[in-house]
Amino acid sequence: MPSHSALDLLLYFFSLTPIRPPCIFETYNWAAGIVARSGKVTAMEKVFHFDSAADPYVADAAVLCCFDQRIRLAVYKFLQKRGILRPDMIIVAGGAKTLASPRNDFERDFILEQVRMSILLHSTERISLMSHSDCATYGGLAAFGGDPEKEALHHKQELHRAAQLIQDKFPEVRVECFFVTFKGIFAALEQGVDQVA
Ligand SMILES: [Zn+2]
């Protein structure tokens, strides 16, 4: 028979008594409610403190981008330069490939749903679609024989196809397309893109 602590025995006593005055569980829940409203969390241990703005926001853009870590900093700096300070980031392997050449219908529909949610929840009016050089989901630069021009041309076509899909599904939004390389970011749609470098 396992041993019991004093608390176990106390809880067992309260479970038996028909009176249960004043119930310790209710007292605990009441206290937890007060704590929750004050912004404190007792259910988990805090391992990092950071003050974030909790105000609701309108997203400057929904940004579909590959999860490749090599392009992350360039993408964030580019967005900041363009004044996109509150993006809804949709970061998945392949980025715009999930719309242009999805592996299956589920992948494409999932991303479209993410865009729809960004528009619905954060009143997003601009969608930025991105792909990048040497993306593993395309087989890397090697898949284009190591030719950056050939790769860029292919990605331009891919981005156009992704943009068309978004525009068809969400005609009210503005769509932008970008190809990210290790030397900079290129606009894949001619109109409406200002150079910020
Ligand atoms: Zn990638």
Image: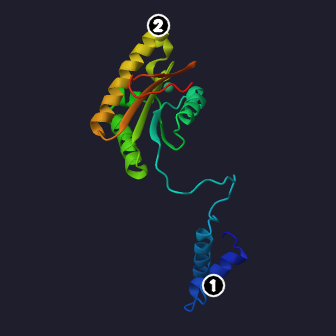
Residue 192 percent coordinates (x, y) = 40, 29
Q: Considering depth in this image, is 41 or 8 the residue closer to the camera?
A: 41
Q: Considering depth in this image, is 165 or 176 the residue closer to the camera?
A: 176
According to the picture, the residue beneath numbered tag 2 turns out to be 145
Residue 98 percent coordinates (x, y) = 39, 31
The image quarter containing residue 74 is top right
Amino acid beneath label 1: Phe
Residue 2 percent coordinates (x, y) = 67, 69
Amino acid beneath label 2: Gly
Outermost residue to the left: 168
According to the picture, the residue beneath numbered tag 1 turns out to be 13
User: What label sits on residue 162 in the rendered view?
Assistant: none
Which mark is first along the chain, 2 or 1?
A: 1
Vertical placement of 104 versus 52: above or below?
above
Vertical placement of 151 versus 120: above or below?
above
Quadrant housing the N terminus: bottom right
Q: Is mark 1 within 8 Å of ligand 1?
A: no
Q: Considering depth in this image, is 113 or 45 the residue closer to the camera?
A: 113
Q: Secondary structure at mark 1?
A: helix
Quadrant housing the C terminus: top right
Q: Residues within 10 Å of mark 2 (few under 14, many from 20)?
A: few
Residue 9 left/right relative to 141? right
Which residue lies at the image location 33% right of the left edge and 31% below the top edge?
104
Q: Is residue 103 visible?
A: no
Outermost residue to the bottom: 19
- What's the CA distance linking mark 1 and mark 2? 76 Å
Vertical placement of 163 versus 35: above or below?
above
Residue 101 percent coordinates (x, y) = 35, 25
Which residue lies at the image location 52% right of the left edge and 34% below the top edge?
82
The image quarter containing residue 184 is top right
